[in-house]
Amino acid sequence: MSTDSNLGARLRMVRRQQGLNQKELAEQIGISPSYLNLIENGKRPLSASVLIRLAQALSIDLASFGASDRELEAYLGEVFGDPLFDEAGLTAADVRAFAVSSPAVGEAVMRLYRSWLEARHRFDELSARVSGQVGPGTELATQPGEEVNDFLQRHGNHFPDLEEAAQRLRRDARAHDDDRYQRLASWLETVHGVRVQWLAVEAAGDLLRRYDPERRILYLSQVLAPRSRHFQLAHQIALLQFPDLLDDLSEDPRLSGEDARRLVRITLASYFAGAVLMPYADVLEEAERSRYDIERLGQRFRTSFEQVCHRLCTLRRPGAQGVPFHMMRVDIAGNISKRFSGSGIRFARFSGACPRWNVHSAFLTPGQIRTQVSVMEDHSVYFCIARTVQKSGGWHQPQALHAIGLGCDLRHARRLVYADGVEVGDTSHAVPVGVTCRLCERTGCLQRAFPLSSRRLEIDENSRRVNFYGGGSQE
């Protein structure tokens, strides 16, 4: 029997999100509405058998159902760590109690905080425009990207229906490795009546792919590398051949609007493309054989370093799982443009990431893989690798340089070729890493950029610490 008081509140939130009343859900799982009401209000424990039936009725993952409150607590800690709430004097215990007792309100607070951040960014950008510091074409901040990250996290970044659809396409189109481009292009023309036409770099500009539905032409830029050409063909096939499937998967009540749903559809089409180029069973077998050698996997499936990293994060099929990885992509300024946590590690959601992560130092050695054993504040330890990836369109076009970070819980490190020669059993030399400065208790960090939100900053002109925010007392 579960005695976690948060499960009832979490159940009520999920039920409401799916548009069910207590009577409807109770009928589906074979209990009375009054008993369900007692469970949701924490007055009756949630038995294992009822929990399993609830998971089936609501299509939720049991593993993530109980853990979601801890994720909410962590994210709320980051929200209330903002200087905006300094005078409130909230403690970690206050945040924990709030997340446990009112998860729906907690998620509403997160949405409100995110909207406030966007409004503040909009105000700053509009002020800059008025002052002439920013041109009129500057884009304003939007939130759909964050919603996509949350969507992938809720699904564990694994979509069985898309895996099956990709497998069918590979079989029907005979899109094997040797003649992949020709097979996919022929499939577009014979099945969908779409011709592929190349655009010269001068005509394409920054356009990589564009589909003209009236003329039934798919335009691809000549700047695309072969692996990217295959990916874009498969992506377009997903949009043309499986629109209903993409629509069904993107009908998530937590998505705020049409912009977020469109972005989710694009993300799912990219997932499909990756599954076409790298079939699940083949990738898992080769990954285990090569001990997750990313470059070897890229050579085997003719895909890029980043594409392989993405695919490794999707190997979550029950009974045939790969190493549970987390992944992040950052630019040289430290902005996180992609993130997914399959390992359980926490990423900063509303603020900058810890500079001690090796994904940042990867820019010092472009193209080389760097390894790191990282220990978090909760004493969880991870084995991480990082490498830069570069995109360039030519001599006169600026190069885009990003760093990809991939990691797993330390107990899986020996399954990775990159752990050879690393003393993973000895964590005494592990690099201390935090989520973000406002929450990190390591006040003596040389790279601390902001004060800890739970401590009152004390200024002493007669002393100097390793960083300006090292002192302070507990609130």
Image (cartoon, helix red, strand yellow):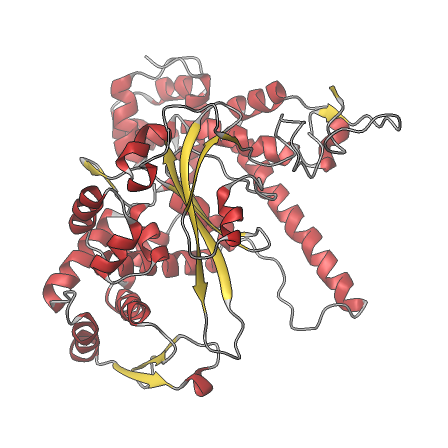
Residue 66 in the image: above or below residue 121: above
Q: Closer to the camera, 460 or 80?
A: 460
Which residue is at a point 49% across and 43% down the rendered structure image?
358
Q: Which image quarter is the N terminus in? A: top left
Look at the image and tell me whether residue 254 can be seen.
no
Left or right of 57? Residue 74 is right
Residue 104 in the image: above or below residue 38: below
Residue 158 in the image: above or below residue 473: below
Q: Which image quarter is the C terminus in? A: top right
Q: Residue 34: x and y, percent? A: 37, 19
- The count of marks equals 0
Which residue is at a point 26% across and 68% down the rendered structure image?
237
Left or right of 294? Residue 121 is right
Q: Closer to the camera, 303 or 369?
A: 369
Left or right of 169? Residue 328 is right
Q: Closer to the camera, 74 or 435?
A: 435
Q: Residue 460: x and y, percent? A: 86, 26
**Residue with the most extreme right position:** 461
Q: Residue 374: x and y, percent? A: 47, 32
Left or right of 122? Residue 207 is left
Which residue is at a point 51% across and 22% down the rendered structure image?
100
